[in-house]
Image (cartoon, rainbow, N blue to C red):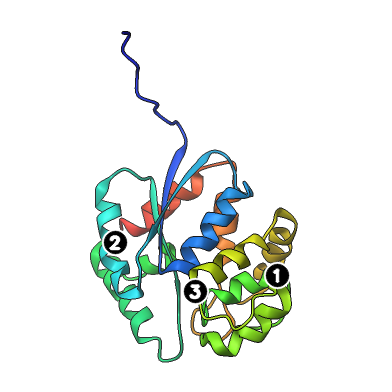
Amino acid sequence: MSNRLPNISDKHKICIICEGNEEYKYLERLNQLHVWNDIYEISLVNAEGNGNIPARYQDRYQNGSYEAVLIFCDTEKKPYEQYEDIKKKVNEFHGVDNAAEEVIIFGNPCTMQIISKHWTDEMIKSPAKQVNAPIIERYTGVKGYKGRADQIDTIMKSLNKENYIDMARRINELPANDKIDGASNFFMLVKHLESNTCEWINLLNDKIQG
């Protein structure tokens, strides 16, 4: 029997640490829609809670298997204590004061701020699922949203290439300051992963390596 060589990909390997199920399933769905440039190979990690994000990030970064490691998470409500703790630990890990600003993709106050932009300009003002349930039902038909796995899966089926374009346009109009209610820098991820050049990866690593 002939020896088979391993299948070595020449794609640029990007790892994204996702806070939880919503973030993981959302990026998984976008990846499945092939809305991003095919030069990237995206690996997603479900941290299963924001308290686990720093450790997951450090582990994947030190692994050396990826050209870039990013974080996708909520800010939650002011004073953003857990979110600020994530930023602090990322900065300390790299020894660079603003490293977190380069690697964290956020939604203020929550990821539904981003997901909802596939359908509407309406702003999400609270991370509370019961508060956002009417908006979700209006555009996806999912009643009484509580973040259950089956509910998330149904919402993801509502996403397609057409409303991805709508989301990208709307998200580009949001402020990128994580201290502002209704803000998000998700367009930075969109811009990076739609790019046909990997120059952003080199710039990113230069900044976080000091």
Measuring from the top left, give residue 24's x and y in whole percent. Answer: 47, 62
- The quadrant where residue 172 appears: bottom right
- The quadrant where residue 88 appears: bottom left
In front: label 2 or label 1: 2
Measuring from the top left, give residue 191's x and y in whole percent. Answer: 59, 55
Numbered marks: total: 3
Measuring from the top left, give residue 46's x and y in whole percent. Answer: 38, 62
Q: Which mark is residue 148?
A: 3
* Relative depth, front residue between 86 and 176: 86
Instruction: Please report whichever mark, 2 or 1, sits nearer to the chain's N-terminal start.
Output: 2
Identified at 57% across, 39% down, the residue is: 38
Three-letter code, disc 2: Arg
Instruction: Please report whichever mark, 2 or 3, sits nearer to the chain's N-terminal start.
Output: 2
Mark 1 is surrounded, within 10 Å at the Cα level, by few (under 14), some (14 to 19) or many (20 or more) other residues, namely some
Three-letter code, disc 3: Arg
Q: Secondary structure at mark 3?
A: loop
* Relative depth, front residue between 127 and 154: 154
* Relative depth, front residue between 99 and 166: 166
Q: Is residue 74 left or right of residue 144?
A: left
Q: Secondary structure at mark 2?
A: helix
Name the residue that disc number 2 marks.
56
Measuring from the top left, give residue 47's x and y in whole percent. Answer: 35, 65
Above-or-below relation of 8 to 170: above
> CA gap, disc 1 to disc 3?
27 Å
